[in-house]
Image (cartoon, rainbow, N blue to C red):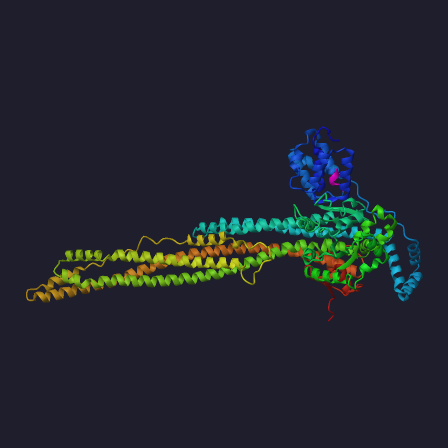
Amino acid sequence: MFSSNQQLNYQFLLITHIVCADQQIHSEEAQALRDLAQAANIEENTLLEMEKILSQEDKYLSLELIAGKIPHGQQTETMRQLLTMAHIDGYFAPLEREMIYKIGQVWHWSKNEIDKIIQEAKSKQTQKNYKNNEDEELSLAAKFLENEYKSGLSRAIINLVVKISPDAIKETVSKLEREILIKGPEYDKAIEHCSKIAKEDYDFAFNALAQVDKALKTLARNLENTIKQIENRTNSKGQANTAKEVAQQLDYSRKALREDIIKELLLVRESLYSKQRALNHFSIAFMGRTKAGKSTLHAIITREGWDAIGVGTQRTTRLNRVYEWKNIRIIDTPGIGAPGGKSDEEIAKSIVDESDVICYVVTNDSIQETEFQFMKLLKEKTKPLIILLNVKHNLRESRRLEHFLKNPNKLFEMEGNSGIGGHFERIHRYAKQQYANDYFSIVPVMLLAAQMNNEPEHQEIKEKLFKASRIQDFLDSIRESLVKYGAIRRSQTLLGSTVGAIDSPYQWVNEQINIYEQLIQTLKNKREEIKRKIKKAEDDTYRSLKLEIDSIFNSAINSIQPFAEQHWKDNQESLNAGWQNKLKEIRFQERIQSAYEDAGKKFNTEVQEVIAEVGTELELMAQLNVGKDFKLKENHKKPFWTNPGFITGVISGVVALLIFLPGGIPVTLPFIATAIGAAIASITSWFKSEDQKRREAVAKISSSLREELNKNKDKVNSDLKKSFTNYCDFATTNIIQYFDELIGGLEAINQNLKTANNQINLANNYLNQAYAKRIIDWSVDKYEQLTEEGIKNTISQVDRQFGRTLTIHTKLELDIRKSQSDIQAILQEDIVIKFPVNN
């Protein structure tokens, strides 16, 4: 199959990449890879590169590099091998499909060519048979009890005897009943029922997630259109620049929202893929800090990998490992807190969505509060939790081992100095802080005893060791819980927990709506504040301007008397010329024009200060996350407008709307009227003295000039008032229009968010009501196909605080067969069922 003259076998390494594509290594994939390596005589150097890929080391050979090494003539056969490996675990994952497309691109294959060969590979796959086909025999006692249970009379007698019997007999009967349950036909029926439930529930989960996916895509598209509409807008005054500047500022918002939308879409799709991957199996995930004993637990269940236990051997992969045990899908995660490469915690998180139960492994020698912080994620996903307490005790010393086997129950006693009761109390205390309740069970086991059971030197006491480890009780309890609670936990995974995938974008959109509403109201308040302050700046500036104008005219009036004394003998032409020279001398018109321009500059400065002050307040509010009513989650992205560029852009955009003053106000210089010359001529009659003539001429000139100056002052003041008011109004209108455009744009974006929010909320309710229907059916011990009509006829309303409380309002009174405490303990959520009140 492979070319033997290659230094590295690139076909084999490419197949290794496809094994890791979905971030999980299924036991069947791992076995197939081992078999392939042996059958093809893969050399040591290739096996070393394989280990690098499996362990996801930083320097492993990339997919693109390896694919590029495959000769053209071998590509088709290699592609078929890749697809065979991708399907070997019964599910062709989207990430595996994505990798196949990447390889096809390296080989310059068209998408149609790739899809054709994918379809061919799919048609050759056979459906896996999920039957309990292991050779498990009931014990004689279990067989006897099973036969007796077939008779109703015998069952009743046995139940009566058990009630009045000592605890030892009750425990024996209970163990026999469990044996019948997990080894008999009820187990197979439970597997089939779980599969049937899962397929129905998955359709509802798919519809809901598809609706959320569509809502987020539509939101992104609507945001693009909103910004374009604003940018292309031209109002009646033709002020398109304002709209463009506003659109530029709003683009900060669009980019920030789009970035988050893409993230939310990825989370929704990942949730959907995980649901699909786990569709055919009841899944349990083992988690815990590194060296807690998960590898030992893995070896106990799969009966392989003992050589890597307890000797410091480095694990061969940092990906999640998946294997099947008695038709249960077991997911083994890397230890939380293990060093190197991609975060193990992130890898473990990747399987939470697809798991029905989480088994969290802790040890009695190191129960620390920090190792329970990861449970917060489990609660956010509403995942049922089992805590496996690995009781560590040194059994390697022969005397200790002998002492342990004489009384193995002693190490599991709750009370006393060496009891484990204190560990139980700490686990409950630490876990409850993160998990919000203490409904979870704690199962103590001794993994070292189970490990020693497999060692050659302990073969004579292997049965004692395994029994003393209490592992079998734990494993049997998992299978028993599948029979009793598997169906409702499948619904919890596919319906109840999927709400978490919807709740995340729903909460994000709600946060954005709050952000925008707060910002819109803030900008509206600032707009009114700016109006008031601009009006005040206008009034203050005009008062200062009027005082300056009055001062300029007063200086002219004060010049009249000396001018008249000097020019009382002049004729009209000389008098007018002299007065013009006098006004130029005191810089009359120049000072008026300068006063007007200074007033405009002063007004501009005050408006800029107002806008800068508003900008400072906005920046401060952004830093404080808009005060006490607007606190974001830890590590949550801050609002787009906390970006300094947004605030600066708004300020500069508004300041740019301030214009320079017009060229000036035409001022009519006060000339001496013709009548003054005539008056002077009449004064110079022969019978008046020189002094009398002078006094009368000075008085006439002064009176005429004062009258002209007063008239001129009134006109100048009127013209200045009109011009200055027009300028201020124009500046104010442009500034307010900018804020109006900005607020209008934000309101349009907010409306888009509200529309998306409503659509996501519908999907949220859709799933919550479907989950509520499953809970109701389970609580009354019945099954019926999940349909929208059945949900509508049973459920009136569901109130849910995701991960904490769930209140179901039914349309009719029902015969609930399970107690509320049992429902809460099994689903590990505060669930209340309320019937309609009869009036």
The residue stretch that appears in magenta: 84-88
What residue is shown at x 15% (from left), y 56% (from top)? 574
Is 85 magenta? The answer is yes
Is 444 magenta? The answer is no
Say which quarter of the image contains residue 795: bottom right
Residue situated furthest left in the rendering? 686
What residue is shown at x 79% (from left), y 52% (from top)? 447
What residue is shown at x 39% (from left), y 56% (from top)? 730
Prevailing secondary structure of the magenta residues: helix
Q: Position of residue 28 (x, y in %)?
A: 77, 42
Name the quadrant of the N terminus. top right
What residue is shown at x 22% (from left), y 61% (from top)? 556
- In the image, taking residue 406 as reference, residue 354 lies left or right, namely left
Residue situated furthest bottom in the rendering? 839
Viewer-closest of 838 and 213: 213
Q: Is residue 472 visible?
A: no
Q: Is residue 137 visible?
A: yes
Name the quadrant of the C terminus. bottom right
- In the image, taking residue 107 as reference, residue 2 lies left or right, namely right
Q: Is residue 821 above or below residue 204?
A: below
Q: Position of residue 199 (x, y in %)?
A: 76, 50
How many badges with numbers are in the image?
Answer: 0
Viewer-closest of 253 and 761: 253
Say which quarter of the image contains residue 548: bottom left
Q: Position of residue 62 (x, y in %)?
A: 65, 38
Q: Is residue 190 above or below residue 92?
A: below
Q: Position of residue 227 (x, y in %)?
A: 52, 50
Q: Is residue 122 above or below residue 199?
A: above
